[in-house]
Image: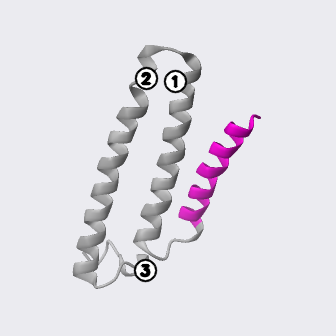
Amino acid sequence: MTPTHFTISSAFLLGMMGLAFHRTHLLSALLCKEAMMLALFIALSLWSLQLDATGYSTAPMLMLAFSACEASAGLALLVATARTHGTDHMQALNLLQC
């Protein structure tokens, strides 16, 4: 395993572990998801550079665009949740009460 592969894999796994174990605030969950997407973007960019194929060069930019859309939707949900419930704690969110 190369050091670059290890670094990207550990960054993705740290984001996943943060998402799994520290789910108290919605903002921390969104930050962990963004860390995972950043690790995937870097891995996909390096993979397309190593293959030297022009067909794969648009994939990192497309994934980055979807990641930006996901982040904006997450922040909109965070603002809506903070306005309706008064907090961004994950314990306050219950689908049965909506």
Residue holding disc 3: 91
Amino acid at circle 1: Ser
Amino acid carrying label 2: it is Ser
Indicate the position of residue 84 as horizontal and vertical percent values.
Answer: 22, 80
Asked if the residues shown at circle 3 and circle 2 are in contact, with their CB atoms under 8 angstroms apart, the answer is no
Q: Nearer the viewer, residue 89 or 98?
A: 89
Task: Say whether marks 2 and 1 touch (CB < 8 Å).
Answer: yes
Residue pictured at 42% horizontal, 16% vertical:
55
User: What is the x, y in percent for residue 43?
Assistant: 56, 36
* Residue 50 x %, y %: 59, 21
Disc 2 from disc 1: Cα separation = 6 Å
Tell me which numbered mark, 3 or 2, is placed earlier along the sequence.
Answer: 2
Q: In the picture shown, does residue 49 fall above or below 83?
A: above
Q: Which mark is residue 48?
A: 1
Q: Is residue 59 left or right of residue 19?
A: left
Which quarter of the rendering shows the N terminus?
Answer: top right
Residue picked out by circle 2: 57
Q: Amino acid at mark 3?
A: Gln
Query: How many numbered callouts?
Result: 3
Looking at the rendering, the stretch of residues picked out in magenta corresponds to 1-20
Please, what secondary structure does the residue beneath circle 1 have? helix
Q: Quadrant of residue 21?
A: bottom right
For the residues labelled 3 and 2, the Cα–Cα distance comes to: 41 Å
